[in-house]
Amino acid sequence: MKAVTIDLNADVGEGLDDAHVMPFLTSASVACGLHAGSPSTMDETVQLALTHGVRLGAHPGYADREHFGRVFVEMPAKEVERLVLYQIGALDAFVRSQGAHLSHVKPHGALYHAAGEFPDVARAIAEAVRRCRPTLFLVGQAGSMLLEAGREAGLPVAAEAFADRRYQADGSLVARTRPDALWTDPEAAAAQALSIARDGFVTALDGTRVEVKARTLCIHGDTPAAPAIARRIREVLQQEGVTVAPLDRRTRQRPPAAAADSAAPRHV
């Protein structure tokens, strides 16, 4: 069987306790203070990730705390570009201050999905990342036009799939307004993670097999039982011979503190 390697990421720094999820991740996308988070939260989340040797990415969203950045905001493409660049720069300052580097940029919520629907939004986000640092990975949903915009801008890109979100037959995610939008059972989420990483497909709500080619798997810190889901995904992937490693695994990050060794999973 062909060797399989995949990144495991989570959206963090959004006001929840990320300490119990972080040990199982290889990458973390940190809220940049507009849809969620604050300067203190950003700094503390960066410290937590580095303690566990987790790569860091910016998670920019619309400046819409009322709706947690999950409602589309119509704005000119140039303003989207500036909004994203502003947030990347803010997180980058905290990361650099601790002797580390950003690995990637992953838009949040409605901005993420708008980049898969509107070419001008996708190009604006890609240009913001390019202006900050063209070596940053741009993360977008597998099949999204955001990935193509990133390639056109000369960026490395990473297709993302979701372990804790359910899929429709057309490859889109089940809307969060539906009660069956999430996998909250660790076994079910781990099964979907394995199906994506090893076999390249998910099973949609109607039983359809949907092809999904991804380099990184996401879980959400605000999904119920997120720590148990993260732990079980790592266990199952290891048992099935899938290597979990960050996108930029060839670049050394600041080494994790010795105290974190016992907390980190030993199956990587």
Image (cartoon, rainbow, N blue to C red):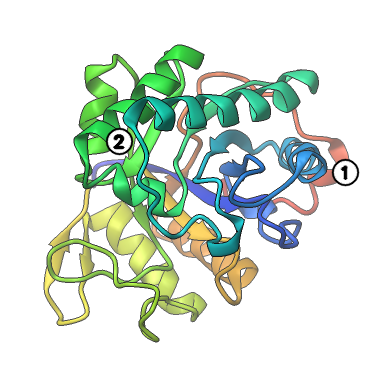
Residue at (42, 29) in percent of width and height: 79
Give the Cα distance between marks 2 and 1. Answer: 43 Å
User: What is the x, y in percent for residue 73?
Assistant: 40, 50
Residue at (56, 35) in percent of width and height: 58
Left or right? Give the position of 208 relative to 220. left
Residue at (74, 35) in percent of width and height: 50
Left or right? Give the position of 31 relative to 72. right
| SS at circle 1 | helix
Q: Residues within 10 Å of mark 2 (few under 14, many from 20)?
A: many
In this rendering, is residue 63 above or below 206? above
Q: Amino acid at mark 2?
A: Val
Tag 2 residue:
121
Residue 137 in view of the camera: yes
User: What is the x, y in percent for residue 47?
Assistant: 79, 37
Depth check: give the residue in front, 208 or 106. 106
Quadrant assignment, res 259: top right
User: What is the x, y in percent for residue 99?
Assistant: 76, 18
Tag 1 residue:
259
